[in-house]
Image (spheres, rainbow, N blue to C red):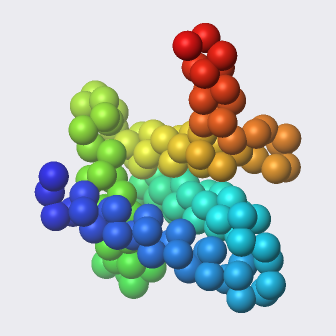
């Protein structure tokens, strides 16, 4: 695994820890803070990657404006983390959009979505597997 991908894992971990700590700071119960922290962290990273994809499509993110430089430094490790499962035929803006979809799907899989009423899918899969074994 490359150092960029390891930095991607670090970005995910720091984002998650900060989100959970924020909820715990405001007296949220522990299990709720864990689920909401994961939901917010992965949604924020998906939104960052989605916005990078849209910016690459319309104006290109290769400019040396401070906003684009910071966006590249934060999102490049996330793209490197998903590089092994990313199709090679995608254009650069589509790679960011694909990564955003992957992070959103990971959020649904691990933490569910309270707004849409989707339960955490890993619990549903676990129950289905246990009933057939």
Q: Residue at x 54, y 44 (%)?
A: 106
Residue depicted at 49% across the width and 41% down the height: 102
Which residue appears at 28% of the width and 67% of the height? 7
Instruction: Give the vertical position of 115 relative to 47 (above or below).
Output: above
**Quarter of the image that includes the C terminus:** top right
Instruction: In this rendered view, identify the residue nearer to me: 65 or 13.
Output: 13
Where in the figure is residue 87, as x and y percent of width and height?
30, 30
Q: Is residue 46 left or right of residue 7?
A: right
In the depicted view, which residue is nearer to us: 59 or 128? 128
Residue 28 falls in which quadrant of the image?
A: bottom right
Which is nearer the eye, 19 or 33?
A: 33
Q: Is residue 61 visible?
A: no
Residue 93 visible, this angle: yes
**Residue at horizontal 80%, vertical 84%?**
27
Image vertical order of residue 6 relative to residue 111, above or below: below
Horizontal arrangement in the rendering, residue 118 relative to residue 35 (left or right): right
Splitting the image into 4 quarters, where does residue 32 fall? bottom right
């Amino acid at each position: 695994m490359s150092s960029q991908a390891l930095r991607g894992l670090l970005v995910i971990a720091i984002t998650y820890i900060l989100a959970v700590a924020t909820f715990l700071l405001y007296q949220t119960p522990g299990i709720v803070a864990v689920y909401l922290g994961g939901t917010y962290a992965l949604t924020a990273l998906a939104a960052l990657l989605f916005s990078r994809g849209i910016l690459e499509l319309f104006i290109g993110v290769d400019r040396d404006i401070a906003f684009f430089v910071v966006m590249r430094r934060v999102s490049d490790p996330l793209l490197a983390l998903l590089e092994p499962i990313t199709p090679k035929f995608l254009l650069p803006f589509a790679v960011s959009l694909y990564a955003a979809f992957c992070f959103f799907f990971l959020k649904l899989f691990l933490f569910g979505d309270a707004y849409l009423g989707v339960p955490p899918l890993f619990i549903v899969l676990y129950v289905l597997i246990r009933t057939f074994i």
